[in-house]
Image (cartoon, rainbow, N blue to C red):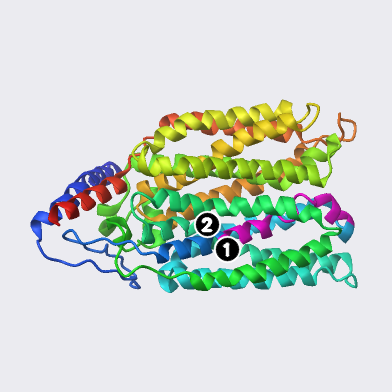
Amino acid sequence: MSDFKNQEAVDVHHDERYEKARDDKAANSESTAHLHTNQDSTWQPLQMDSPTEYKLYKARFVGCVALCFLNAMGGMNWLWFSAIALETSTAFDISVNKVNWLSDCVNLIYLPVSFLIPWAARRIGLRKSYILAAACLIVGSWLRYAGTSKSLPPGGAYALLLLGQLVAGFSQPWYQVLAPAYSQAWFGLKSRTTATMIISLSNPIGSALAQLLSSIFDTPRSSILVLGIITTVIAPCALLIQDRPPTPPTYAGSQDVPPIMVTVRSALGFPLPDEVEKAMTLRQRIDFWILTIGFGIIVGIISAFSILIAQVYSPYGYDANASGLVGAALFIAGLVGAVSISPLFDRVFTNHLAWSLRLVLPIVAGAWIGLIWAISSHGLGPSYGVLCVAGFSSFMLLPVTLELACEVTGSAETSAASLWFSANVFTVLFVLVADSLRAGPDASPPGNLRKVLIMFAIMSAVVSASMIGLEGRQSRRRLDEDRARDNRETI
């Protein structure tokens, strides 16, 4: 009975929260907004009683471009070995499964780091967080190169390769998890979703470049050296990123970020008594879990397919170059889709993000179903076609899902951490399951991964069907729009 009372209290406070924020202007005619990082164990939401002047700064573009380069380097370091898995296996005298772990280990370290990030970002800020991640990229790159020495035994070389991947992989979640936080801190209502898209999509761009570039070198060893040089040149871009603007761009951008455990307790339905006013309702919790699991499955499918791509196509007679081109097509189509469609979500479909998921995800599922037959067809044409559709449709929804998760949780960092945590869990699971689903030597063709593609198709169809239960109310945007309207009326 107490659980029902607690839920009723949460719902009442949720209904009152929006009305209270709208009435702040009438209750107080003079107040100022200020930014701060709360170091206390007890979180108190930042108070902004009356409309304040919101401003945009040109420095936001410099930081956005720097983040794009850094996030692209994270993606490049992650999937560098996927298109050259067979060549790497031969060059270092290790199994293909061990080569897969050079990518999987990045997904694995992502899991604990993703939930460390919101806590760390509250204490050291965005700028220092990005600099720390960039330093790890450089160190990891040269540890990995140390493993290319021919004087090392296979076990020693692999240990250094794996250690380098782990250290470099430590950096990747910082750029992805904090992308919505940077957009919220620096960008206005008409560009926030687009900024999140640009930063988030730079990681797949790096992954696509990895598929293309890694296969053009004579040996995996020489390609690792080039990767280290590129990473070392790009990583100092982190120094160009500033923490937060002097004046926030929106009401949401002015608010203090709640500690990660406040959001976690709210998502699980167990807020503390002093957190009830800001807690999620039952409806919001359902939306959050639908988004988290759905995002994890779709991104996990794309990531696992990218890791396994050489092993998917090699049984049909295609080499590393062909596999790399197919993988790049998936990411390039996704980039085109996101760049062309995301501005519409900021300016046209701003209040219809949930409907976008319901309408587009069936197309994504259809593409993965089509790949089952396309991959066994003559030539790569059918594969290019269905993967371009899958990439175009999936990647345009990536920033939409991140934005909706921010809407239902009220915490950009924690919601992004949860979504990317889920994505990496499913990536690791899919790659591990793939080895057990691999066809035997008597299959036609031997060692094919057709059952893995069937698994991808089924899982994507399940995600598409689950969107029926998504409400996706955009309370944060509604409040931001009202605050902006109040400002215009005051001026």
Residue type at mark 2 is Gln
The region drawn magenta spans 69-90
Q: Which residue is mark 1?
A: 70
Residue 175: x %, y % from top left: 53, 61
Q: Quadrant of the N terminus?
A: top left
Residue 268: x %, y % from top left: 40, 49
Residue sitting at x 22%, y 44%: 15
400 vs 306, left or right, is left
Q: Judge the density around disc 2: few (<14), some (14-19), many (≥20) Cα neighbours within 10 Å.
A: many
226 vs 419, nearest the viewer: 226
Residue 427: x %, y % from top left: 63, 47
410 vs 135, nearest the viewer: 135
Q: Is residue 119 magenta?
A: no
Residue 199: x %, y % from top left: 51, 55
Q: Earlier in the sequence, mark 2 or mark 1?
A: 1
Q: Secondary structure at mark 1?
A: helix
124 vs 2, left or right, is right
